[in-house]
Amino acid sequence: MQTKNVVEHRVQKGVYLVDGQLATLNAAPGKRVHGEQLFKRGGREYREWNPKQSKLAAAIVKGLKTPAIQPTSIVLYLGAANGATASHVSDIARVVYCVEFSARAARDLLRVCSQRENMVPIVADARKPGEYGDVGEVDVVFEDVADPEQARILKENARFLRKGGLALLAVKAACIDSSKPPKKMFERSQKRIGGLI
Ligand SMILES: C[S@@+](CC[C@H](N)C(=O)[O-])C[C@H]1O[C@@H](n2cnc3c(N)ncnc32)[C@H](O)[C@@H]1O
């Protein structure tokens, strides 16, 4: 459906440009998660998704070549924090399992999940996927944790991926080695993932 000033993103289904701003269709109408703007257009409510605050949104704006998430996707999200980006994933996908180990962040995450039927909180350590082994098969693993062993964590969690599924890693270069240029850290992570999965 096309509404005036609302255009669906050409690559990522479920993501829109509303008056030129990136947004998702709000699965919990009337509710905000992170102080974002709500836009009502054509009887639907959209939520602003700020690419300066969300790496996944930034990747979409920067020209992600294939869709990260499909409307039918089951997503395992590692490092969900307070649920800000994960809530946008929940606007797009079928189910989002949200793994977070900080008690402080988990408190906010639980509140967000209670407002969204397809968002499942898992208060656990992503380095120990055995703790949430009953998640079952997923279509996408998305990792955004600040850990020097990010690539290894992705490998550990790739056990949940269905055949042909997608793994996405937000690399925190400074967290791996802040003394080295970020580009080197991106290349190192790429190599490690290539050899790991
Ligand atoms: C950069 S923040 C994530 C931001 C979030 N993805 C967003 O865009 O809204 C990283 C989060 O990963 C969590 N984290 C780091 N290591 C973790 C681990 N081993 N298991 C689970 N969560 C972890 C931190 O507590 C923090 O909340």
Image: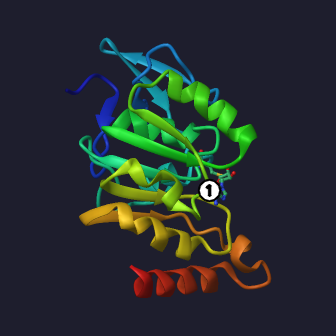
Residue identifier under label 1:
125
Count of numbered labels shown in the rendering: 1
- Percent x, y of residue 5: 34, 27
| 141 to the left or right of 69 | right
| 43 to the left or right of 48 | left
Q: Quadrant of residue 151?
A: bottom right
Q: Residue at x 43, y 83 (%)?
A: 196
Q: Nearer the viewer, residue 136 or 167?
A: 136
Q: Nearer the viewer, residue 15 or 135?
A: 135
Mark 1: amino acid: Asp
Name the quarter where the C terminus is drawn. Answer: bottom left
Q: Residue at x 68, y 32 (%)?
A: 107
- Secondary structure of residue under mark 1: loop
Q: Can residue 16 be seen in the rendering of this structure?
A: no
Image position of 50 with respect to 59: above or below: above
- Percent x, y of residue 96: 41, 42
Q: Quick check: is the Cβ at mark 1 less than 8 Å away from ligand 1?
A: yes
Q: Residue at x 52, y 23 (%)?
A: 114
Q: Residue at x 42, y 24 (%)?
A: 26
Name the quarter where the N terminus is drawn. Answer: top left
Image position of 1 with respect to 161: above or below: above
Q: Nearer the viewer, residue 110 or 44?
A: 110
Q: Can residue 58 be seen in the rendering of this structure?
A: yes
Q: Quadrant of residue 171?
A: bottom right
- Percent x, y of residue 33: 58, 27
